[in-house]
Image (cartoon, rainbow, N blue to C red):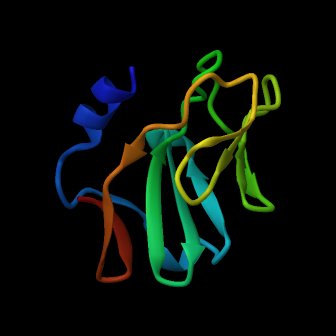
Amino acid sequence: MAGAYAKRLSTSGASIAAAADVPVGGGLVVKDKKVVITQPKKGEFKGFTAVCTHAGCIVSTVADGTINCPCHGSKYSIADGSVVRGPAPRPLAELPVAVDGGQIVSA
């Protein structure tokens, strides 16, 4: 499922969010695009699908270094999308992003 979503988002340069809206050590869930943008270190932005790998819920928050799913409590690392706490069976799929003119865009 993540692969199909990545194809839809793959229009290079499509704006996702403002870089200024993504806190260092945290992130931003862009629900309408089903994307999570994180900034594990200052100036390092990562993109992931916002669809939880357990039951397909949309993750809801980013806090304390994790991307959090409200449905069953799965947590993922903001650095690489890996599972920090299950029941999620797989990491979140990474989506390539870049910064262009202060905007996070699909790369």
Along the line of sight, which residue is nearer the eye, 84 or 72?
84
Name of the residue lying farthest toward the top: 55
Asked if residue 18 can be seen in this view, the reply is no
Quarter of the image containing the C terminus? bottom left
Residue 49, image x, y percentages: 47, 39
Q: Is residue 68 above or below residue 12?
A: above
Q: Relative to residue 37, is residue 86 drawn left or right?
A: right
Along the line of sight, which residue is nearer the eye, 2 or 61?
2
Q: Relative to residue 15, is residue 21 drawn left or right?
A: right
Q: Relative to residue 48, is residue 10 drawn left or right?
A: left
Q: Is residue 5 above or below residue 99?
A: above
Q: Residue at x 64, y 19 (%)?
A: 54
Residue 56, image x, y percentages: 59, 19
Name of the residue lying farthest toward the left: 12
Residue 100, image x, y percentages: 27, 77
Determine which quarter of the picture holds residue 99. Answer: bottom left
Q: Residue at x 44, y 54 (%)?
A: 47
Asked if residue 13 can be seen in this view, the reply is yes
Q: Residue at x 64, y 15 (%)?
A: 55
Along the line of sight, which residue is nearer the eye, 14 or 73?
73
Residue 60, image x, y percentages: 71, 42
Q: Residue at x 30, y 36 (%)?
A: 6
Q: Relative to residue 19, is residue 77 drawn left or right?
A: right
Quarter of the image containing the N terminus? top left
Determine which quarter of the picture holds residue 28. Answer: bottom right
